[in-house]
Amino acid sequence: MIGFIKKLFGGDAQSRLQKQKKLLATNDPKTLLALARDRKTHTEVLYFLARSEDPVIRRAVANNPAMPAQASALLALDTDTDVRMTLAARLVELLPALPADRQSQIYAYAVQALGMLAQDEVFKIRKALSTALRDYAKAPPPVVARLARDVEREIAEPILRFCVALEDEEMLDILSGHPEPWVISAIAARPEVSEAVSEAVVETQDAPGTAVLIGNSGAHLSVETLGRIVAQAQQYPEWHKPIAMRKELSVDLARQLAGFVNATILQVLEKRSDFDAATRQGVLDMVGRRIEYLHSSASGEKPEEKVLRLVKAGKLTPEVIQDALSWQERDFFILAIAYQSGIRPEIVRKMLSLNNAKPIIALCWRAKLPVRMCLDVQRFAGRLSPRDLLYPKGGTEYPLSLDEMKWQLEFFGIKS
């Protein structure tokens, strides 16, 4: 073993250290620089040289693969920008060789130094770190978390967009802090986005960021999150096609989406091959009905004329009313509901405008609409947010009692 150590270090280690200390004592600049550059220089000597008054020597220490981990924290505070820049590059190169044990002292020193550099006042140092760590899977989480919060977009965005070492907890915290829109879009565009982070992106209510998320095949969406997206999608036509192509799209959500998208998107739904035969037929029937309705109106026909025509023909059905709602024919919808319920159109309009689900439920009941239509009326006619919706009891019964619905009608002066 002694022979192996001598061979490894080129002689007795202690003797070598004493020789290097004697060279230090000469204070000769060339000799000191040579020591700072030599990979065989003892770590104790390198640590001493890291305190040199000469920035060229300190830079050589920072660039030396044998640099002791203890010196990295010292050099991270160096007054010379080039020394800190050199240290940043060296530490990134050394990361693969660091112990896997995050509790080790060497790992702690390296992370401490990187953390200091991640807060460096010099833009190019932080940018260099961000550029290097964005593609490094084993980058220290505390360091990438700090870079992800940098005020400069050029530094934060690469980490937010690409760095797999950035943990979900950090992204959730960032998204909860009302970040800039580009931050939301960067997170939404990551190669892989967990369900929790996807939900947080949607909760920001940032339309461009949500659009990026929907179009990202690496984003995982729970059925609940996709349901929230579909509930808001009528306001954002640019979302429709990517939603129709999402693998998580359930049958119920496909039917809901078919309620308001245009003919092009309906054709995308029609071609979905991942639904079973019965479901596929149900979606096809709805698609066909929506398209047929779209082309059934006479050119220039006014809403009141359309209602009268359908009443005379006995075709003012709940399905037709739902189709009109899906195509955002609000005036026709109000007149049709007024006819069905016996409530004056201006009262119907008021009941829909209060941002309250209860009068809308009472209106649907009075118009004898199927329970399943209540959600669409709340969403598209009442324009309620998902959190304000009232869902059918057991999926088949109105969410309010008979007395509650009658009270709502009486509040508007309508005798039940």
Image: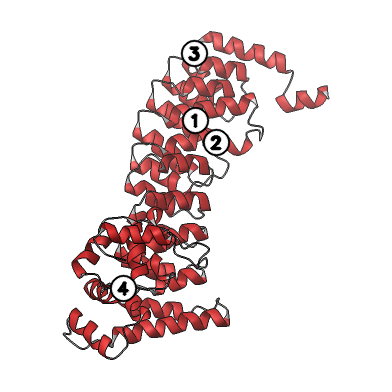
Q: Residues within 10 Å of mark 4 (few under 14, many from 20)?
A: many
Asked if disc 2 and disc 1 are in contact, CB closer than 8 Å, the reply is yes
The residue that mark 2 highlights is 140
Q: Quadrant of the C terminus?
A: bottom left
The residue that mark 3 highlights is 28
User: Disc 2 marks which amino acid?
Assistant: Pro
* Of callouts 2 and 3, the N-terminal one: 3
Q: Residues within 10 Å of mark 3 (few under 14, many from 20)?
A: few
Q: Is residue 257 left or right of residue 14?
A: left
User: Disc 1 marks which amino acid?
Assistant: Leu
Q: In front: mark 3 or mark 4?
A: 4
Mark 1–mark 3 Cα distance, whole angstroms, equals 32 Å
Q: Residues within 10 Å of mark 2 (few under 14, many from 20)?
A: many
Q: Is residue 38 visible?
A: no
Residue 93 lies, with reference to residue 39, above or below; the image says below
Residue 91 lies, with reference to residue 413, above or below; the image says above
**Mark 3 element type:** loop
- Farthest right residue in view: 1
* Of callouts 2 and 1, the N-terminal one: 1
Q: Is residue 43 left or right of residue 304?
A: right
The residue that mark 1 highlights is 114
User: Disc 3 marks which amino acid?
Assistant: Asp
Asked if disc 2 and disc 4 are in contact, CB closer than 8 Å, the reply is no
* Of callouts 1 and 4, the N-terminal one: 1
* Of callouts 1 and 3, the N-terminal one: 3
Q: Residues within 10 Å of mark 1 (few under 14, many from 20)?
A: many
Q: In front: mark 1 or mark 4?
A: 4
The residue that mark 4 highlights is 325
Name which residue lies at 64% across and 27% down.
103
